[in-house]
Image: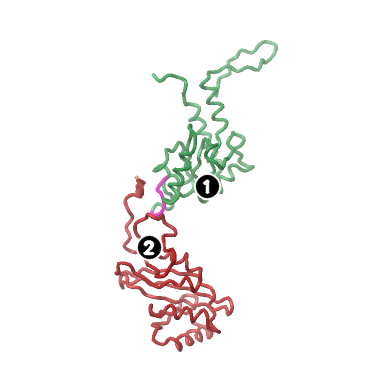
Amino acid sequence: MPTIYNKLPADGFSGAVFTTVDTAINWFRLSSVWYLLFGLACCAIELMQTGGPRTDIDRIGSVFRATPRQSDLIIVAGTLTYKMASRLKLLYDQMAEPKYVISMGSCANCGGLFQRSYSVVKGVDKILPVDVYVPGCPPRPEALTAGILKLQEKIQKERFLVKKA
Amino acid sequence: MMDDRAKRLVMGLKARFEDAVLSVSEDSRSVPAIKVLDLHKRDIMLFLRDTEGFEFDTLVLISGVDLIDDDAIEIVYRIHSMVHRHHLVVKVEVKRSLRHPNVDSIHDIWPSANWMERETYDMLGVDFIGHPDLRRLLLPLDWVGHPLRKDYEEQAEYRGISTVRD
């Protein structure tokens, strides 16, 4: 989070915050991580609930989009089959940079309960680069929220404007 | 034990198709299960659907059993009658070691057989002769192998995705 430099005048708060451009840009980006609805199986129910009224990720800025063109994040919630894998890759390719992937639930992390099955991809990271893994079967909405907050921490640490040494 | 109605069904069928009925047994719910010769299967199905007193108007299930030790694949047909509320199971055996084990399709007798036969082809590799559109239903179209066979081995990778978690 940007540090608020203490330059308050004696007669009241002037309403100004001083920070670096990098920090500010990242602050704006992490406060508005829109995710693509990609509920495949049971984890989709918990995904819906995480966007629902009790655990509301809209309050941390994450609202769902039905199209990859308007999303920053894809939450792969559920079991991925080989048949679905090519469609997933297509949707991921349609997202604009910078984009992130959260793998939600056992099945997306490693194939989960269906690891011995012939038709299940043993983990979504065989196809996409995953940023955050959220374990659970299914993960509680609180767990998924923690995953999104972790992603926000990751976004905060990115540096675009600083020349790499 | 089969109840009287079921016994009468089996008697009626045997009376009409003496040589075709190979054996009669029953499943766990006392539904009679009749094993018939492949050659007469279509005639028997048409008889069961159209004759008064039988009138099996619904095909519920087509499935297969891989009996690798007997060199056979058993195709199981489960039919119900909404009119009379009785059920029947008809089984047909196909030789497994053929390059393309095949049976006649019954999609023109009961239209629901269309997708059921596609699924049986997908999982067990049994061809249905006369089927208008025999391709895989559940697995991707370029999948190799038929998973419900007892000697099925998973391929090492599919389109570049490795099938092993490592």
Q: For the residue labelled by badge 1, is the local secondary structure a helix, a strand or a loop? A: strand
Image quadrant in which you'd find residue A130:
top left
Apparent side of residue B166 relative to residue A42 in the rendered image (left or right): left
Q: Position of residue B115 (x, y in %)?
A: 47, 64
Colour that chain A carries in the picture: green
Q: Residue furthest bottom?
A: B15
Nearer to me, B90 or A158: B90
Q: Residue furthest right?
A: A11
Residue drawn 53% across and 75% down?
Answer: B80
Q: Residue furthest top?
A: A10
Tell me the residue that label 1 is attached to. Answer: A39
| Chain coloured red in this rendering | B
The span picked out in magenta is: A116-123
Above/below status of A160 relative to A147: above
**Could you tell me which chain the residue with mark 2 belongs to?**
B
Residue drawn 36% across and 61% down?
Answer: B146
Q: Disc 1 and disc 2: Cα gap in Å? A: 28 Å
Tell me the amino acid under the disc marked 2. Answer: Leu
Q: For the residue labelled by badge 2, is the local secondary structure a helix, a strand or a loop? A: loop
Image quadrant in which you'd find residue B63:
bottom left
Q: Which mark is residue B148?
A: 2
Q: Which mark is residue B133?
A: none
Whether residue A119 is in magenta: the answer is yes
Q: How would you classify the magenta stretch by its main secondary structure?
A: loop
Q: Residues within 10 Å of mark 2 (few under 14, many from 20)?
A: some
Above/below status of B67 relative to A65: below
Question: Are the numbered discs 1 and 2 placed on the same chain, yes or no?
Answer: no
Residue drawn 48% across and 32% down?
Answer: A97
Image quarter (top left, top right, bottom left or bottom right) of the N terminus of chain A: top right
Q: Position of residue A89 (x, y in %)?
A: 44, 43
Q: Position of residue B3 (x, y in %)?
A: 52, 83
